[in-house]
Image: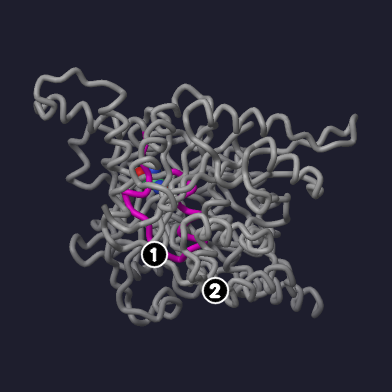
């Protein structure tokens, strides 16, 4: 057995308490104290991965370098740690069963009856230890999705119980995240739901070592004492997690509460260093003291749920801080944009971002938004589908290709400027079959995108089926839309930009997945800067009138 230590994070009382943020914050502090840490999420649903889920179900689907389509919490892990995750960092019940059933079909179980205990629980334990066994980490934090007591999380809880026993004292601990509700009629914070959820965990044979208590109000010493006594944890292991303005404050709050120190002590890691959080604090300082505000329109079709575009919104927070501006993002449903209203609805923004997406709904609105940005010289950032929309708009309006389209929307278009790649044509299975993960991209020297990255070659993450149709490339380039980034293996267009426009870039990949607190993504940083310039220019021209 390796010497890796394990921290399990469970949730009680309700969902959406922010287990992912607590796990990421603790990991950040441990990393800042010099430990090699990674975080893993176990999701109890039966989908093999969230790639086939509508964003309204679980928010954005996050993509890793190795092409895993994962839960959005992995985005938080990467943003907090500035460290890549992989396929092994997200496991679903679907994936566990798929693997056990494949083994059963191969005859690996030698005639045994295949059961939840031990076969499913063994598979879960293996997946948990996979990261630890690489020898790359001192500590692995495993977040168990769902809420204790749910039928579907039972095998995970049992696997954790067994693993804690196998690891032995001081090698694995459990942090239980709960809610301390405030009853305004009684004027009191209530501990009973927490007591019950700790009890539910105990019924499965797991004792919480640390309680992290989500609360809207300060938890008094008296309540902390009560929680410690009735939930069977040490007084110092009752950690308050009070609501705060931004998720990026949570690591500092957890540091104040001593979450990392309590965890380290319980893991017998007493030789810890002072945490190095200066870059993090500098980011918070800039984030909280912006000198200006820029207004950006985010045009998409899943606008009712903020989580659908999580990584984009977070990338704006990172890049806003880098520019010392507050980025005010207004989500606009592309379905409401028409030829008549689009100018009034979006031309007053300092920048326009057309979001990724799938299917026909809202497509025409996105194309019109790209047109306003191009013709009125408003900074435009098209991501994946947003790039494809800019290409279609240019084809229709500049190249006179009436009805140009993507074959995703119109398979019979006379101008399929966005086409399906040959190797995608025979695919019938939808799960995990897109162009996924990191692909190389070479940048053209005299382009805007090159001046932003300052690199000849980059690698960015993909998640799409359709591509720029190279048959039309010469025509586009002759008329001012340049392919400034190309994948060297397949010759696929990765970046387009418009010469003479202050900032008009479309990327076939998803830069938002790689933006982190300490390494804000250069394209987002540059786009925000361009929106600020655009705003300044507008106010100067108004003054001179
Ligand atoms: N639907 C488009 C494609 O599959 C764009 C996907 C996206 O925006 N992620 O190519």
Q: Which mark is residue 192?
A: none
Sequence-wise, the earlier of marks 2 and 1 is 1
Q: Residues within 10 Å of mark 1 (few under 14, many from 20)?
A: many
200 or 277, nearer to the observer: 200
Q: Is mark 1 within 8 Å of ligand 1?
A: no
* Residue at image coords 21%, 36%: 427
> Which residue is painted at 67% across and 32% down in the image?
195
Residue 44 in percent (x, y) is at 43, 31
Is residue 4 depicted above or below 199 in this figure?
A: below
From the viewer's perspective, is 446 left or right of 501?
left
Q: Which residue is mark 1?
A: 496
> Which residue is at a point 33% across and 53% down the rendered structure image?
86
Q: Residues within 10 Å of mark 2 (few under 14, many from 20)?
A: some
Image position of 515 with respect to 371: above or below = below
The answer to whether residue 100 is above or below residue 415 is above
Tell me, yes or no, whether the highlighted magenta stretch contains residue 124: no
Between marks 2 and 1, how big is the CA–CA gap?
Answer: 14 Å
* Residue 502 - label: 2
- Identify the secondary structure beneath mark 2: loop
Q: Is residue 324 left or right of residue 26?
A: right
Q: Which residues are magenta?
A: 71-92
Query: Quarter-wise, where is residue 19 in the image?
Result: top right
């Amino acid at each position: 057995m390796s010497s890796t230590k394990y921290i399990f994070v469970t949730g009680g009382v309700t969902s959406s308490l922010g287990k992912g943020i607590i796990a990421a914050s603790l990991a950040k502090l441990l990393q800042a104290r010099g430990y090699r840490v990674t975080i893993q999420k176990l999701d109890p649903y039966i989908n093999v991965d969230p790639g086939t889920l509508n964003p309204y179900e679980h928010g954005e689907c996050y993509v890793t370098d190795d092409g895993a389509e994962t839960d959005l919490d992995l985005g938080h892990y990467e943003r907090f740690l500035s460290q890549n995750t992989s396929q092994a960092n997200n496991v679903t019940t679907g994936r566990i069963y798929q693997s056990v059933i494949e083994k059963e079909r191969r005859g690996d179980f030698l005639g045994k009856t295949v059961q939840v205990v031990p076969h499913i629980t063994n598979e879960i334990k293996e997946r948990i230890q996979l990261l630890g066994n690489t020898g790359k980490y001192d500590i692995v934090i495993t977040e168990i999705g769902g809420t204790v007591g749910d039928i579907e999380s039972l095998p995970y809880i049992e696997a954790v119980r067994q693993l804690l026993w196998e690891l032995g004292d001081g090698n694995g601990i459990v942090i239980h995240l709960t809610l301390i509700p405030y009853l305004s009629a009684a004027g009191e914070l209530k501990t009973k739901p927490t007591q019950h959820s700790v009890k539910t965990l105990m019924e499965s044979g797991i004792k919480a070592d640390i309680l992290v208590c989500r609360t809207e109000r300060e938890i008094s010493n008296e309540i902390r004492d009560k929680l410690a006594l009735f939930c069977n944890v040490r007084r110092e292991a009752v950690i308050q997690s009070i609501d705060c303005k931004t998720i990026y404050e949570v690591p500092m709050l957890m540091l104040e509460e001593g979450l990392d120190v309590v965890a380290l002590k319980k893991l017998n890691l007493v030789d810890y260093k002072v945490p190095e959080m200066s870059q993090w604090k500098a980011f918070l300082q800039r984030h909280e003291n912006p000198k200006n505000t820029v207004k950006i329109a985010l045009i998409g079709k899943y606008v009712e749920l903020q989580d659908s575009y999580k990584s984009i919104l977070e990338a704006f927070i990172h890049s806003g801080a880098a520019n010392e501006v507050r980025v005010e993002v207004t989500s606009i449903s592309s379905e409401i944009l028409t030829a008549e209203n689009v100018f009034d609805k979006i031309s007053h923004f300092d920048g326009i971002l057309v979001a990724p997406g799938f299917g026909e709904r809202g497509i025409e609105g996105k194309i019109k938004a790209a047109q306003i940005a191009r013709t009125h010289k408003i900074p435009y950032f098209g991501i994946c589908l947003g790039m494809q929309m800019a290409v279609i708009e240019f084809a229709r309006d500049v190249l006179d290709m009436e009805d140009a389209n993507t074959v995703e929307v119109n398979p019979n278009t006379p101008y399929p400027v966005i086409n399906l790649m040959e190797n995608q044509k025979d695919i019938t299975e939808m799960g995990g079959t897109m162009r996924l993960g990191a692909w190389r991209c070479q940048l053209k020297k005299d382009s805007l995108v090159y001046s932003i990255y300052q690199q000849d070659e980059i690698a960015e993450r993909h998640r799409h089926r359709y591509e720029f149709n190279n048959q039309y490339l010469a025509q586009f380039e002759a008329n001012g839309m340049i392919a400034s980034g190309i994948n060297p293996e397949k010759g696929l267009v990765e970046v387009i930009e418009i010469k003479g426009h202050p900032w008009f870039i479309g990327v076939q990949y998803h830069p938002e997945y790689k933006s982190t607190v300490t390494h804000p993504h250069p394209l987002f940083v540059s786009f925000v800067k361009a929106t600020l310039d655009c705003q300044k220019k507008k106010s100067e021209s108004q003054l001179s009138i």
